Image (tube, rainbow, N blue to C red):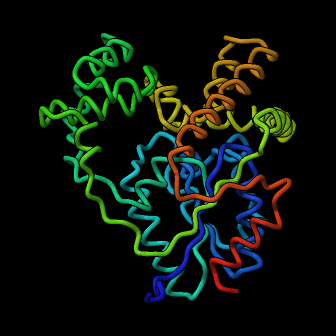
Amino acid sequence: MALDARPRAIALMGPTASGKSACALDLAWRLGGEIVSVDSALVYRGLDIGAAKPTRDERAQVPHHLIDVCDPWQPYSAAEFAQAARAAIDGIVARGKLPILAGGTGLYFRALLEGLSDMPEADAVLRAAIADEAGVRGWAALHAELVQVDPEAGARIHATDAQRIQRALEVFRLTGRPISDWQRNARGTRLPLSVLKLVLAPAARSSLHDRIAQRFDAMLEAGFLDEVRALRALPGLAAHPQPLDLPAMRAVGYRQAWEYLDGNATAAQFRERAIAATRQLAKRQYTWLRGELDARRFDPATQAAALQAAVQGFLGR
């Protein structure tokens, strides 16, 4: 059997707060790697503390890519991410370094590793019309319409996920064909690398819940609310008619902090809601990860040696 001569890459997947960033930094430091963030919150400038973005010191130790690429009021699609990430990976490979793909955004991983279906490009006029319609009817009503025309997408997309509702309706109205059908018949171009998929997750879900709460309290201590106050003062967000509909502000913790600063929750309610939202994110990530059948799973707290052995075996070292 011929040896796989493709360049190697490591994909570190897992739920939020599972230790992916620390593991990626350690592997990159020891193996001569560079990190490509696969996280839909880290692309936004200004989302630092609440998004658990690598610190400046960490980014100085090891090159990081796909961090701080757009402002929080700007749209950024999975297709844009995949294109930019593949360009970054090409550069890493050309430098003789190991690409380490780390994050918890399933759509970004799928777009990067498998490619996206050749769906119609965004139509600015139709997109604006759908947004205007939502301003009158509400996103819940548009989600109900989506359920009627595309039950599969309607079940998958949350009723408050304005960006994905808008895109699904846009595709249907442009083509008369449900977006789920386009996605199901995807023929994207796979990433031309040999990729070791590693899922990092505590064996006990309660352990992850404890980590989530502890990390959020540490974020508060580090000045998370001041970070959100600074975001609210940015002209691009302050002028937006519905800032909480923006993907950046739907990142867990940020919406809850914004509502707290608006006076719509007590400090205790804010903390409880933010932690609950983060746990819900982790639950959705676990659901996605169950579908990654070719991934190897490790508890980073108890199986560090086995994880390292898997990496060394993959790299042939």
Q: Is residue 101 visible?
A: no
Residue 135 in percent (x, y) is at 34, 16
Q: Quadrant of the N terminus?
A: bottom left
| Viewer-closest of 99 and 180 | 180
The residue positioned 34% from the left and 19% from the top of the image is 143
Pick out the residue farthest to the front.
1
The residue positioned 57% from the left and 56% from the top of the image is 68
| Viewer-closest of 121 and 313 | 313
Residue 58 in percent (x, y) is at 76, 65
Residue 198 in percent (x, y) is at 63, 60
The residue positioned 26% from the left and 57% from the top of the image is 187
Based on the displayed image, in which of its 4 quarters is residue 306 positioned?
bottom right
Q: Quadrant of the C terminus?
A: bottom right
Residue 314, relative to residue 225: is it above or below? below
Based on the displayed image, in which of its 4 quarters is residue 128 positioned?
top left
299 relative to 124 in the view: left or right:
right
Residue 50 in percent (x, y) is at 70, 40
Q: Is residue 163 visible?
A: yes
